[in-house]
Amino acid sequence: MGHDHDYERFAPQDADGTATAGGVREFVVGTGGAPLRPIGVVKPNSQIRENQTWGVLRLMLRAGTYSWEFVPIDGQSFRDFGTTACVP
């Protein structure tokens, strides 16, 4: 995943990759301008994948929550967004 040219969001997971509500959410955001690539094998806990849209990930950190929004470049319409409580 270290050099993917796509967007992918994962469910919160622990260090072993097991889905858990108290885990860390992972984002892959390789949509900054290089040619986008096909998505290979879908990995465990992958919730959403997109490889046709360039854009950026906006993260908003607040006391007790975080929000994310994938913002596409002008003329493209894919969006992904959400809010999750931070786990102490």
Image (cartoon, grey):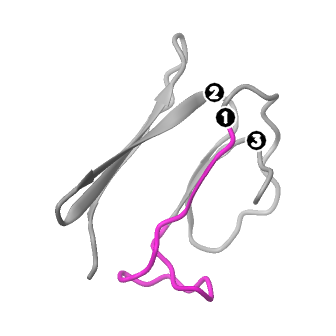
Q: Which residue is mark 3?
A: 5
Q: Is residue 78 left or right of residue 53?
A: left
Q: Which residue is mark 1?
A: 31
Residue 53 is situated, as x and y percent measured from the top left of the image, at: 63, 28
Q: Which residues are magenta?
A: 11-31
Give the residue type that dot 3 points to.
His
Q: Residue at x 72, y 25 (%)?
A: 33
Mark 1 in CB contact with mark 2 (< 8 angstroms) = yes
Residue 72 is situated, as x and y percent measured from the top left of the image, at: 51, 25
Q: Is residue 21 above or below residue 81?
A: below
- Res. 78 mark: none
For marks 2 and 3 on the same chain, the one whose residue lies earlier in the sequence: 3
In this view, the residue farthest toward the top is 75
Q: Which residue is mark 2?
A: 54
Q: Report the magenta stretch's main SS.
A: loop
Secondary structure state at the residue bearing disc 2: loop
* Real-space Cα separation, disc 2 to disc 3, in angstroms: 9 Å
For marks 1 and 2 on the same chain, the one whose residue lies earlier in the sequence: 1
Q: Residues within 10 Å of mark 2 (few under 14, many from 20)?
A: many
Q: Is residue 21 magenta?
A: yes
Secondary structure state at the residue bearing disc 3: loop
Q: Residue at x 36, y 81 (%)?
A: 21
